């Protein structure tokens, strides 16, 4: 099998979501915002209608037939527990944390690899980035 002749699916374009506060005016906007929050690789901040604020990482979301039946699951930054919040209880969503996956595609790594190779560097490999 020749890999050059195989069909390849295009990757998904990454949006710059860091700092974004989406409008949550309609049910469709709420659902779209939480799909993006699920794909986001940083923390988000939820402001609930009762005034509470939950900041953490969205690890799951479950879309029901209504906002009350739809739930976002989040790992709070300052608690060892996991929290489930119905979409209907959320007043605002902010993409507050740094997107740790931004600019880290395989294509970006290959480009950096070849830049280093052309500059004469040796022992070039995949090394994890230090976490903040």
Image (cartoon, rainbow, N blue to C red):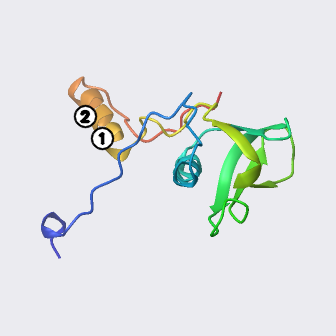
Look at the image and tell me in which quarter the N terminus lies. Answer: bottom left
What residue is at 35 percent from the left and 39 percent from the top?
Answer: 109
Nearer the observer, 84 or 66: 66
Left or right, residue 82 beside residue 98: right
Q: Disc 1 marks which residue?
A: 110
Left or right, residue 14 beside residue 39: left
Confirm whether residue 123 shows in the render.
yes
Outermost residue toward the left? 5
Q: Position of residue 84 (x, y in %)?
A: 79, 57
Outermost residue toward the front? 26
* Secondary structure state at the residue bearing disc 2: helix
Nearer the observer, 108 or 102: 102
Q: Position of residue 123 (x, y in %)?
A: 38, 35
* Secondary structure state at the residue bearing disc 1: helix
Q: Residues within 10 Å of mark 2 (few under 14, many from 20)?
A: few
Q: Disc 2 marks which residue?
A: 114
Contact between marks 2 and 1 (CB within 8 A): the answer is: yes
Left or right, residue 76 beside residue 121: right
For the residues labelled 2 and 1, the Cα–Cα distance comes to: 6 Å
Look at the image and tell me in which quarter the C terminus lies. Answer: top right
Q: How many numbered discs sit on the rendered protein?
A: 2
Outermost residue toward the top? 119
User: Residue 9's image quarter?
Assistant: bottom left
Q: Position of residue 57 (x, y in %)?
A: 69, 45
In the depicted structure, whether residue 129 falls above or below residue 57: above
Q: Position of residue 59 (x, y in %)?
A: 66, 54
């Amino acid at each position: 099998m020749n890999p050059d002749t195989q069909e390849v699916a295009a990757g998904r374009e990454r949006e710059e979501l860091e700092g974004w506060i989406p409008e949550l005016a309609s049910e469709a906007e709420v659902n779209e915002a939480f799909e993006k929050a699920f794909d986001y690789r940083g923390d988000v901040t939820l402001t609930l209608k009762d005034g509470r604020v939950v900041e953490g990482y969205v690890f799951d979301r479950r879309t029901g037939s209504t906002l009350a039946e739809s739930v976002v699951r989040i790992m709070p930054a300052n608690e060892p527990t996991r929290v489930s919040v119905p979409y209907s209880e959320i007043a605002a969503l902010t993409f507050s944390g740094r997107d740790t996956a931004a600019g880290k595609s395989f294509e970006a790594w290959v480009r950096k690899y070849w830049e280093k190779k052309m500059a004469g560097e040796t022992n070039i490999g995949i090394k994890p980035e230090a976490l903040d």
